[in-house]
Image (spheres, helix red, strand yellow):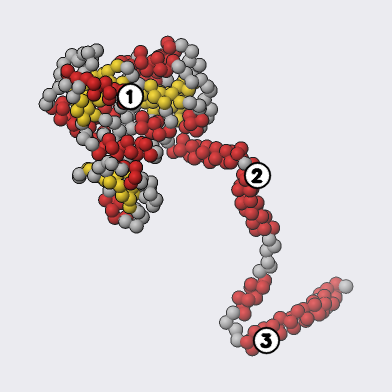
Amino acid sequence: MAVVTFANDQLVKAPLFSGSPVRVGKMDATAYSGMASEFGVRGYPTIKLLKGDLAYNYKGPRTKDDIVEFANRVAGPAVRALPSKQMFEHMMKRHDVLFVYVGGDSPLKEKYNDAASELIVYTYFFSASEEALPESVSLPELPAVVVFKDGGYFTYDEYEDSSLSLWVNKERFQGYVQIDGFTLYELGETGGVCSCSIYNTLMQRVAKEYREQFNRDFQFGHMDGNDYINSLIMGEVTVPSVIILNTSNEQYFLPSEPIESMEQLVQFISSVLNGSAQAYGGDGIIQRIKRVAFDARSTIMSVFRSSPLLGCFLFGLPLGVISLMCYGICTAESDDGSDDIDALKREGLTDDEEEEEEERQRAAALEGPEEEDEDVGEKDPEEKKTD
C-alpha cells in the first residue's frame, strides 16, 4: 500500500512513516494529467492512499499528525478486534467516538464490514464479543452495532435509522463539538442541519438532554468568536448567540429574541424543525452575487484596516490611472473631418492629377471672393428699373 501525493511539491514526506508498512510517493499531476484523471484528481494537492484495488481520498486537515493518523488507520484492517476488557477500556481512552460490532456472523456484520471499508477514512471500527464489553453495557439483543461517545453508548436501529453507513457517518461526531470552517464542511456531508452556539452554554445541555428528539435532524456544536458566522450570513451576530445552519442549501435561522432559557432554545429548534421559523440566506443567484460583493468588500476593508498605506497604493493607483485615461478620452478635440474627405477624394488619382486638383483648389480659393464681389456689384435689370 502507498500514500501518493498529487501535487507540485512534497507535501507528505517518507520519514514520517518510518517503521510503517505505508510507502510514500508523489506525482506531478500537471505533467501526468492522464494518471491524475484516472484517479479522479480535481484539485491540488490531493492525497490518496492506495490499498489493493481501492483508492482512499484524504479529506482531513493538512497537518502532519492528521495525515499520519489517516495513513496508519486506513493501512490496517477495516475492522479491528477487541479481544479483552482491558483492550476495550484502552481504546475507550484513546478515542472520543468508538464504533463496535458485537455478536457473531450475520447479515448485520456484512453491512458493518462494508460501512467500515467505506468510512475508515474518518474513524476506526472495532468488533468484540459480549464478554469483552464493560459490565455497565447492557444490550437488548445481539448482534448489535454500538457507538460509544459522550460518556454513554447508543445502538443502531435498523428500522428507525435506515442505512448503517448514513448512521455511522452522522454518529462519528461527538454530540457537542467545536466547529470551524473544516468541521462545518464535514458536518454538512452528514446531510443534517447544524445548530451552533457562540458562547452559549445552553446548547450543550440541549444536545445531551434532548438527543432522542433532535439527534436525527440536527448536529450540535459551538464556535469561538463570531467572525466566521459573520462572513457566512453577511452580517453581524451578537455574542452570545444561537444560529442554525442548513448546510445543504446555505439557509440559516436566527432567533427573534435573545435565548435565555432552555425552554426558549428548545422552542426555537422545534420551530426550525416544523418549518415555522423564518429562513434567511440560501443559494439563489441573487444571494450568490451578494456573497461575492460582500467578500470583495470584506477583503478591501481588511486590507485598509491592516495597512492603510498599502490599501491606498493597491486600489488608489489603478483607479487614478483609469480616471486619467477616461479624462483624456472625454476631453480629446475631434478633428474636422475635411482632411479625411479630401484624402478620400484624392484616392486613386495619379501624381499629376493630384497636383492639378490642388492647383484648382488654390485658384478657386483666390477667385472666390472676387466673383462674389462682382456678383454683389452687378444688379438685375429689373432692379435697375425699380431704382
Q: Which residue is most to the front?
A: 19
Q: Which numbered disc, 2 or 1, marks the residue closer to the eye?
A: 1
SS class, disc 2? helix
**Which residue corresponds to the image point at 43% horizontal and 23% vertical from the top-left?**
222
Q: Is residue 211 left or right of residue 198?
A: left
Q: Amino acid at mark 2?
A: Leu
**Badge 3 or badge 2: first in the primary sequence:** 2
**Which residue corresponds to the image point at 22% horizontal and 27% vertical from the top-left?**
126
The 10 Å Cα crowd at callout 2, few under 14, some 14 to 19, many 20 or more, is: few
Q: Amino acid at mark 3?
A: Glu
Measured from the top left, where is residue 2 in percent x and y?
26, 46
Measured from the top left, where is residue 138 in percent x and y?
21, 13
* Observer able to see residue 259: yes
SS class, disc 3? helix
Q: Amino acid at mark 1?
A: Asp
Residue with the mark numbered 2? 309
Viewer-nearest residue: 180 or 133: 133
Quadrant location, the C terminus: bottom right
Image: 114 above or below 27: above
Residue with the mark numbered 3? 356
Residue with the mark numbered 1? 96
